Image (cartoon, grey):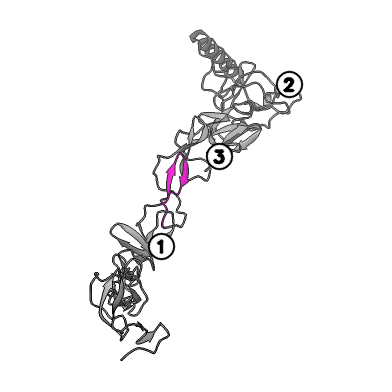
């Protein structure tokens, strides 16, 4: 009876194998060994593919290779070389890897440990992060000149180039035009990347730039350089000051569109001056008694009174002689005139022995009243003949 059952099992197994082969099926869902492997090299129910047949793991010797880029094989380690196959799709078994080197499987650079069959510099990814293969591992960033740079890092020699492994995992790429770059310390230029180069383009003339601290200069850009031209005369500076037009803030007054420094006199009034503490847009009177010049040479003591220059101690003109009238003072020179009396004008020659004194060409002379042989000499009659004398 036992013999008959065994024979039947063999017959049924042979029939199943014949049926499978006839239908073109490579494997069936049974645990017996010997069925052909699936096209993808896999077997079911814990069997493993060996020499195109599904076998129990314990009956499969090692193939001599280490794990390829797919799953580990089920064999025991051997010392043979690696195989040249591509990764299979079968499940892993419990056996250890063999001692060979990686085979030439396809490089699929995904996952942190997926770079084993990939060359350094191959682009890879870990989840959503782009990276580059280096030493069999996928690292986020770029491998440039055997140096790993983090994503977003700039080139050490050009801050207009950046690491972007999604574009190039082995070189820096140009930053976007307009990206800020290293300043040239000139606030009259823009420092921006253009075609991978940091350029410094001049700002528009007139653009404000660094204040030089002088309230009487305009701080503006000109031809890419910060310039400081002088502000116009009269520009307000400080609380009571005005610019003098030469870059100097003068504490003074602006009167009639003209700037005067503190202490400058009124050109029209010697008794007024610029006094910004009193007024920054008008003249201020000098203190009473301040010496001044009224412009009249015939006054010799001029002082200010209520903002007016008053002349004092005038020049007095007197007659130069009996036949002259008192003159007048010339205000430009301070000299007196000397007018002559008309000829025939009555005068006094100062002699008591003359009469009818009159002027002739500025000389006063009278008629001699002494009897001959005497003449009027001084105030008396004198005998010039050496005679007996003059009668009374």
- Spatial separation of the CA atoms under disc 1 and disc 3: 55 Å
Most common SS among magenta residues: loop
Where does the magenta region start and end? 215-230
Q: Earlier in the sequence, mark 1 or mark 2?
A: 2
Q: Quadrant of residue 123?
A: top right
From the image, tell me which residue sits under label 3: 153
Please say if 377 is above or below 139.
below
Most extreme residue toward the bottom, as rendered? 392
Q: Residues within 10 Å of mark 3 (few under 14, many from 20)?
A: some
Please say if 25 is above or below 68.
above
Secondary structure state at the residue bearing disc 1: strand
- Locate the C terminus by quadrant: bottom left
- In the visual, does 110 lie left or right of 134? left
Residue found 42% across the figure and 60% down from its top: 249
Q: Please tell me which residue lies in front, 257 or 93.
A: 257
Q: Earlier in the sequence, mark 3 or mark 2?
A: 2
From the image, tell me which residue sits under label 1: 250
From the image, tell me which residue sits under label 2: 81
Q: Please tell me which residue lies in front, 58 or 318.
A: 318
**Measured from the top left, where is residue 251 in percent x and y?**
39, 65
């Amino acid at each position: 009876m036992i013999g008959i059952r065994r024979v039947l099992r063999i017959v049924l197994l042979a029939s199943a194998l014949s049926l499978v082969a006839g239908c073109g099926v490579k494997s069936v869902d049974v645990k017996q060994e010997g069925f052909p492997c699936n096209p993808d090299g896999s077997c079911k129910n814990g069997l493993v593919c060996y020499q195109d047949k599904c076998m129990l793991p314990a009956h499969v010797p090692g193939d001599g290779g280490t794990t390829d880029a797919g799953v580990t094989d089920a064999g025991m380690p051997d010392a043979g070389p690696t195989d040249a196959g591509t990764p299979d799709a079968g499940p892993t078994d419990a056996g250890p890897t063999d001692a060979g080197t990686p085979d030439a499987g396809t490089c699929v650079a995904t996952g942190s440990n997926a770079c084993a069959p990939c060359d350094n510099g191959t682009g890879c990814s870990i989840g959503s992060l782009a990276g580059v293969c280096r030493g069999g591992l996928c690292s986020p960033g770029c491998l440039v000149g055997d140096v790993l740079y983090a994503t977003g890092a700039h080139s050490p020699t050009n801050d207009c180039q950046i690491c972007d492994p999604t574009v190039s995992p082995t070189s820096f790429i140009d930053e976007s035009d307009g990206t800020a770059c290293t300043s040239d310390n000139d606030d009259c230029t823009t420092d921006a990347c253009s075609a991978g180069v940091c350029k410094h383009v001049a700002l528009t003339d007139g653009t404000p730039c660094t204040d030089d601290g002088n309230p009487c200069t305009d701080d503006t850009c000109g031809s890419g350089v910060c310039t400081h031209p002088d502000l116009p005369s009269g520009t307000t500076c400080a609380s009571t000051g005005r610019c003098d037009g030469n870059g100097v803030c003068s504490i003074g007054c602006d009167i009639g569109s003209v700037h005067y420094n503190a202490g400058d006199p009124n050109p029209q009034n010697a008794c007024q001056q610029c006094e910004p503490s009193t007024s920054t847009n008008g003249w201020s009177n000098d203190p009473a008694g301040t010496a001044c010049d009224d412009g009249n040479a015939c006054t010799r003591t001029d002082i200010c009174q209520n903002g007016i220059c008053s002349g004092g101690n005038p020049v007095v003109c007197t007659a130069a002689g009996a036949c002259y009238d008192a003159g007048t003072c010339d205000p430009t020179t301070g000299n007196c005139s000397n007018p002559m009396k008309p000829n025939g004008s009555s005068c006094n020659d100062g002699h008591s022995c003359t009469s009818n004194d009159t002027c002739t060409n500025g000389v006063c002379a009278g008629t001699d009243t002494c009897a001959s042989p005497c003449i009027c000499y001084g105030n008396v009659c004198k005998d010039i003949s050496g005679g007996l004398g003059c009668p009374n």
